[in-house]
Amino acid sequence: MRLTIALALCILAVRVGTAQQANGGGKADSTRSTRSGVYSAGQAAQGGELYALICLSCHNAAFHTAPAFVAKWDGRPLAALYEFIRAEMPKNDPGGLTRKEYLLVTAYLLKLNGMPAGPAELPADSLALAKIRLDLKPKADPAP
């Protein structure tokens, strides 16, 4: 009986691995880049107002576009940045803003980093944010 179960699990693992290889190595097809316009201009504008009122006393805008910030967050899911901000900021009252306010500040940080706005708002759903990849490093121009 144990041998049958072990064999069935091995077959299942091989099938899943084969499906993942055919599907791009297991990467989610639905992952979008922050370069594809994942927030609205209105969200960024509101986020900029919140940033000026709440965040600017500790962080200037250059802090969120500096090489250290880019190195830490580039390639990670947008949900990771959102959840970090929500759990840790503001320093004097972590978690003190509403989820919507944290989302607006996140949209503003995308704008600061040169990400384009799009027609739709940044989703409030953590699962949807997890499907958005932070692409903060400037894209190299192709050689002529």
Image (cartoon, rainbow, N blue to C red):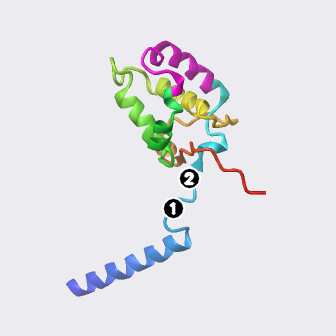
Q: Does the magenta stretch include residue 53?
A: yes
Distance from disc 2 to disc 1, alpha carbons, whole Å, reads 8 Å
Residues rendered magenta in the picture: 43-62
Q: Name the residue under label 2.
A: 31
Q: The N terminus appears in which quarter of the rendering? A: bottom left
Residue 20 vs residue 118: left or right? Answer: left
* For the residues bearing labels 2 and 1, Cβ distance under 8 angstroms: yes
Q: In the picture shown, does residue 8 fall above or below 117? A: below
| x and y, in percent, of residue 125 in the image | 49, 39
**Total numbered labels:** 2
Q: Secondary structure of the magenta portion, mostly?
A: helix
In the rendered image, which quarter is residue 7 located in? bottom left
Seen at 50% across and 38% down, the residue is 67
In the rendered image, which quarter is residue 99 located in? top left
- Name which residue type carries label 1: Lys
| x and y, in percent, of residue 66 in the image | 51, 33
Q: Mark 1 points at which residue?
A: 27
- Name which residue type carries label 2: Thr
Q: Does the magenta stretch include residue 67?
A: no
Seen at 49% across and 70% down, the residue is 20
Seen at 45% across and 15% down, the residue is 54
| x and y, in percent, of residue 81 in the image | 45, 37
